[in-house]
Image (cartoon, rainbow, N blue to C red):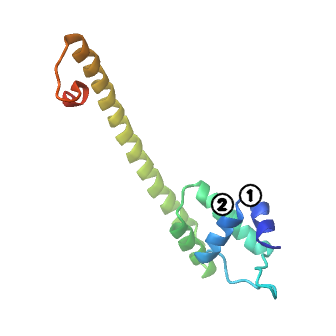
């Protein structure tokens, strides 16, 4: 099958398929006389894996690492687990940072209400100048 068919079969865009191919995520392929890549069932399986890995927020570099391990005969599930653990840790940190930011914003909003009621003067905006 050609790129459009492979893209459609894996629910990605032809542009994504070409990008992933240019990044070496797909193995070298046979091409038609006119230069079109011929995608095999195995290529479609790899495209499906890449799409699903992207849905788990893995980077193309991380996906390439996993594919490389598999192509060299290793079972990469341990590496995938480590990558997922790393992503979970980053998400936990981001969520904690966002929770702190939310608390700061709530306090700033309270300061804005209190300052407005008290008629506080400010150079630019008392909400930011008097932020907690």
Residue wearing tag 1: 11
- Identify the residue shown where x is 60% and y is 82%: 72
Q: Residue 80's x, y, as percent?
A: 54, 63
Residue wearing tag 2: 51
- Identify the residue shown where x is 33% and y is 36%: 101
- Closer-to-camera residue (73/125): 125
The C terminus lies in quadrant:
top left
Q: Residue 99's x, y, as percent?
A: 37, 35
- Identify the residue shown where x is 68% and y is 84%: 28
Q: CA distance from mark 2 to mark 1?
A: 8 Å
The reply to whether discs 2 and 1 touch (Cβ–Cβ < 8 Å) is yes
Which numbered mark, 2 or 1, is in the foreground of this view?
A: 1
Label 2: state its secondary structure.
helix
Image quadrant assignment for residue 73? bottom right
Image quadrant assignment for residue 17? bottom right
- Closer-to-camera residue (127/84): 127
């Amino acid at each position: 099958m050609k790129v459009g068919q492979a893209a459609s079969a894996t629910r990605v865009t032809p542009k994504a398929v070409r990008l992933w191919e240019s990044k070496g995520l797909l193995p070298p392929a046979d091409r038609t006389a006119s230069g079109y890549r011929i995608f095999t069932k195995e290529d479609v399986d790899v495209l499906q894996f890449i799409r699903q890995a992207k849905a788990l927020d893995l980077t193309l570099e991380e996906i390439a690492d996993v594919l490389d391990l598999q192509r060299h005969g290793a079972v990469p599930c341990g590496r995938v687990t480590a990558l997922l653990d790393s992503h979970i840790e980053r998400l936990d940190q981001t969520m904690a940072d966002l929770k702190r930011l939310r608390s700061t914003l709530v306090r700033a909003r309270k300061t804005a209400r209190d300052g407005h009621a008290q008629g506080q003067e400010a150079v630019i905006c008392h909400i930011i100048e008097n932020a907690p």
